[in-house]
């Protein structure tokens, strides 16, 4: 009860000072946010505190009064000026589930592989600002974004929402997004905490991992996101970690609060609560849409009873409420409450940003004979497949955005959630026609291979759009393109005409035809302006600079966990339905992440001496770059540890373009290389610049569980500039390090 006493004394002092001037203390902007939050909590009744920590589902036939309509809603406390929490999904754009806002479309952002593949923090920040603006404009003040789950397996159905396999890149990218969103007075989450690396059986799946391996991989991404981005909320995941559900796992929930300086609140994913007392004591602060998804209100009446019985201290409830109102005050959601606006949005600017992101992250994988960029003087082009005459594919599930003008859906695909399969109405074919008005452009759907081949024979260049849909709630069974697409590409390639393949997928795919086609472009899911972005890349209006942030394996046998029973099916993944109990032999129930441990993605391939199809960091350009004069300086002091590298980069080609300078560090103890810094630089043809790259000290360190610290092993570290994580063509230097305990 000590915490409650502290709140009482502090708030009485604050209240006395403020009321002397006739101002309610929680509204006195001269006071600190912490003081205002304490005063608010002290002024609340027990029921008002309980009201704050339990959201209601706000869709369907039971939309609560006052709710705009969204994933969740918490009624405001009018007498205290606390606004309602209007909570929306917005991983890749503000969603409009069930068309709850009739006729309203928003900007669909490119997939996470593109955002991270841009290696551009400033661009990620702009993405966050856009999300915050579009949410605030519609009256939402809590945004369920910030997906930073590491890509441990290229089959995960939600990988398109995430930011790749490296904790440094993913953590800093999402931190920029979070900062951008919260600059618009909208609370952002970071999610799904933690090790939510698979969708199959996600409501029961147990992820086993050692503390050191966890801290050096997925948890490091969350640590960076939390310390740098300062999210208002952390959303805990469905799965178990080391046998305990994430949302009642005291190790997971206390880690950010005790070690990372996290002052926000922890909310459950929708359907991820499993207890009252255990969860409250572990550090859970808010239950999400309880009655709809948990099928029980754990933080409602049961928590009230637990408090009355002193099973949960009143101080714990005060802390829950404090964290929520403090977050509202910190991001401005209290002083600048959101409400639906009638002002006109700058739609053109938002769609232009989505296009810019796509152009910065789309990756050129192959370009034989410099078939790309295409010339506007080509007489005829055959465009085949992928509904390229209509739009571009998007991923499914809770992140599905409704584009302005509506989405294009297919009648033969899955219609129920996480579907339907949706295309954004941004046609690559129309964009190509606009760039090459003198070129005859013909389209074939690709269903009939013979007809497609005939069109290809009578064209100068063939562009095949190959698609594969991924979505929340299931993992891909394999990495094959669905349907007859591989056969189609092989048949078209046999015509002898130059073939360019554009991939619109949520994950890597097998390409049995790779050696025979001229060019391959990984366009991922390119967003609501994706058609224009793809065309600009193909025609060289934009020089591709995107890099892969997920390693593409040759086959599933190269993965740490190749066999996943039940994969490809929706198994215990829809929280709105009761859990189904499958025989253990029919569905994966435990995954040992220690097989790879901290060596996620490219680190695993280096450790196991495996050669992937394409490594992390890979990407081609229409120009070339050369490196020289690598220097690394230690800037260590009593309160900070900084490493700064400098390298001279020259654009040695005849086109302007951007290069991603990637610096990797290899420890003297034999552990695989780690990305320890990056910087994106634009250079005109022939231009040379000396590029500074800040290095991340933890990439040279190990987390030591016994001391709860990051420690640098003494010895010589290999510091190298590489075109990708596994490249043998590298500019290398050595750095001698003494044993160091890094500051928290």
Image (cartoon, rainbow, N blue to C red):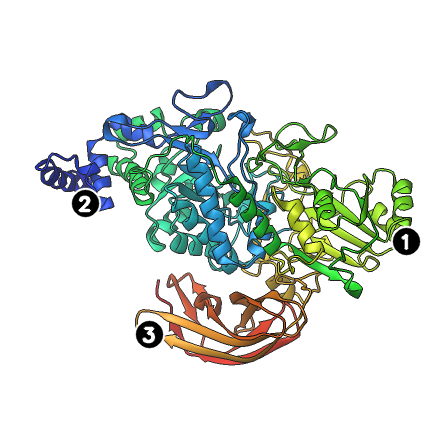
Asked whether, in this view, residue 6 is left or right of residue 446, the answer is left
| Residue 564 drawn at (x, y percent) | 67, 45
| Residue 44 drawn at (x, y percent) | 23, 30
Task: Name the residue: 35% across, 50% down.
Answer: 262
Mark 2 and 3 residues: CB-CB less than 8 Å, in contact? no
Residue neighbourhood size for the residue with mark 2, other residues' Cα within 10 Å, grouped as few (<14), some (14–19), many (≥20): some
Q: Quadrant of residue 109?
A: top right
The answer to whether residue 715 is seen in the rendering is no
Q: CA distance from mark 1 to mark 3?
A: 63 Å
Residue neighbourhood size for the residue with mark 1, other residues' Cα within 10 Å, grouped as few (<14), some (14–19), many (≥20): some
| Residue 411 drawn at (x, y percent) | 73, 28
Task: Name the residue: 61% across, 30% down.
Answer: 417
Helix, strand or loop status at disc 1: loop
**Residue position marked by numbered label 3 in the rendering:** 637
Q: Quadrant of the N terminus?
A: top left
Q: CA distance from mark 2 to mark 1?
A: 73 Å
Q: Quadrant of the C terminus?
A: bottom left
Asked whether, in this view, residue 732 is left or right of residue 173, the answer is right
The answer to whether residue 248 is seen in the rendering is yes
Q: Is residue 94 above or below residue 255?
A: above
**Residue position marked by numbered label 2 in the rendering:** 31
Task: Name the residue: 77% across, 64% down.
Answer: 370
**Residue position marked by numbered label 1 in the rendering:** 494
């Amino acid at each position: 009860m000590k915490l409650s006493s502290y709140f009482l004394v502090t708030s009485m002092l604050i209240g006395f000072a403020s009321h002397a001037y006739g101002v309610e203390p929680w509204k006195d902007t001269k006071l600190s946010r912490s003081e205002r939050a304490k005063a608010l909590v002290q002024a609340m009744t027990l029921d008002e505190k309980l009201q704050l920590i339990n959201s209601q589902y706000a869709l369907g036939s039971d939309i609560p009064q006052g709710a705009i309509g969204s994933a969740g809603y918490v009624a405001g406390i009018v007498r205290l000026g606390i606004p309602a929490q209007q909570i929306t999904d917005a991983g890749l754009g503000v969603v409009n589930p069930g068309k709850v806002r009739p006729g309203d479309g928003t900007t669909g952002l490119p997939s996470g592989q593109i955002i991270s593949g841009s290696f551009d923090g400033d661009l990620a920040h702009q993405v966050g600002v856009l999300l915050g603006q579009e949410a605030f404009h519609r009256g939402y003040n809590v945004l369920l974004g910030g997906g930073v789950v590491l890509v441990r397996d290229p089959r995960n159905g939600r990988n398109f929402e995430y930011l790749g396999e490296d904790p440094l890149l993913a953590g800093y990218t999402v931190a920029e997004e979070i900062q951008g969103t919260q600059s618009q007075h909208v609370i952002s989450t970071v999610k799904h905490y933690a090790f939510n690396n698979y969708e199959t059986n996600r409501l029961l799946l147990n992820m086993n991992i050692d503390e050191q391996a966890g801290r050096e991989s997925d948890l490091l991404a969350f640590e960076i996101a939390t310390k740098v981005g300062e999210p208002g909320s952390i959303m805990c995941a469905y799965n178990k970690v080391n046998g305990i559900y994430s949302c009642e796992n005291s190790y997971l929930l206390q880690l950010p609060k005790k070690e990372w300086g996290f002052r926000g609140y922890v909310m459950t994913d929708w359907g991820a609560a499993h207890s009252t007392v255990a969860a409250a004591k572990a550090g859970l602060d808010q239950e999400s849409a309880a009655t709809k998804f948990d099928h029980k209100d754990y933080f409602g009446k049961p928590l009230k009873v637990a408090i009355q019985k002193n099973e949960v201290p009143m101080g714990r409830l005060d802390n829950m409420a404090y964290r929520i109102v403090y977050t509202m005050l910190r991001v401005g959601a209290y002083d600048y409450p959101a409400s639906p606006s009638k002002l006109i949005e700058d739609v053109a600017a938002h769609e232009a940003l989505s296009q810019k992101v796509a152009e910065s992250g789309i990756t050129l994988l192959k370009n034989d004979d410099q078939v790309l960029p295409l010339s506007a003087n080509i007489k005829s082009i055959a465009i085949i497949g992928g509904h390229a005459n209509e739009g571009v594919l998007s991923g499914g599930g809770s992140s599905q955005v409704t584009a302005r003008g509506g989405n294009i859906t297919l009648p033969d695909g899955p219609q129920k959630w996480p579907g339907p399969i949706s295309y954004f109405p941004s046609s690559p074919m129309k964009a190509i026609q606009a760039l090459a008005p003198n070129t005859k452009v013909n389209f074939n759907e690709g269903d009939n291979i013979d007809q497609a081949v005939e069109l290809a024979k009578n064209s100068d260049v063939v562009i095949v759009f190959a698609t594969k849909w991924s979505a929340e709630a299931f993992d891909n069974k394999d990495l094959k393109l669905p349907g007859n697409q591989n056969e189609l590409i092989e048949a078209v390639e046999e015509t002898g005409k130059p073939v360019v393949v554009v991939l619109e997928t949520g994950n890597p795919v097998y390409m049995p035809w790779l050696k025979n086609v001229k060019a391959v472009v990984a366009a991922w899911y390119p967003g609501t302006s994706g058609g224009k972005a793809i065309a600009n890349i193909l025609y060289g209006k934009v020089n591709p600079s995107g890099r892969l942030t997920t390693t593409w394996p040759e086959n599933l046998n190269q993965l740490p966990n190749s066999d996943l029973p039940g994969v490809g099916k929706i198994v215990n993944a829809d929280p709105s339905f009761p859990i189904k109990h499958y025989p253990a032999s029919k569905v994966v129930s435990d995954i040992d992440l220690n097989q790879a441990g901290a060596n996620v993605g490219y680190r695993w391939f280096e450790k196991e001496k495996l050669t992937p199809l394409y490594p992390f960091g890979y990407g081609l350009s229409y120009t070339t770059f050369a490196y020289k004069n690598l220097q690394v300086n230690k800037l260590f002091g009593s309160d900070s540890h900084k490493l700064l590298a400098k390298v001279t980069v020259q654009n040695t080609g005849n086109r302007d373009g951007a290069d991603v300078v990637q610096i990797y560090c290899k420890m003297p103890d034999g552990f695989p290389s780690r990305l320890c810094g990056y910087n994106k630089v634009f250079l005109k043809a022939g231009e040379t610049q000396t590029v500074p790259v800040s290095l991340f000290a933890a990439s040279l360190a190990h987390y030591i569980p016994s001391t709860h610290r990051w420690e640098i092993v003494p010895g010589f570290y290999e510091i190298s500039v590489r075109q990708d994580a596994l490249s043998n063509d590298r500019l290398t230097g050595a750095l001698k390090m003494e044993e160091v305990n890094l500051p928290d």
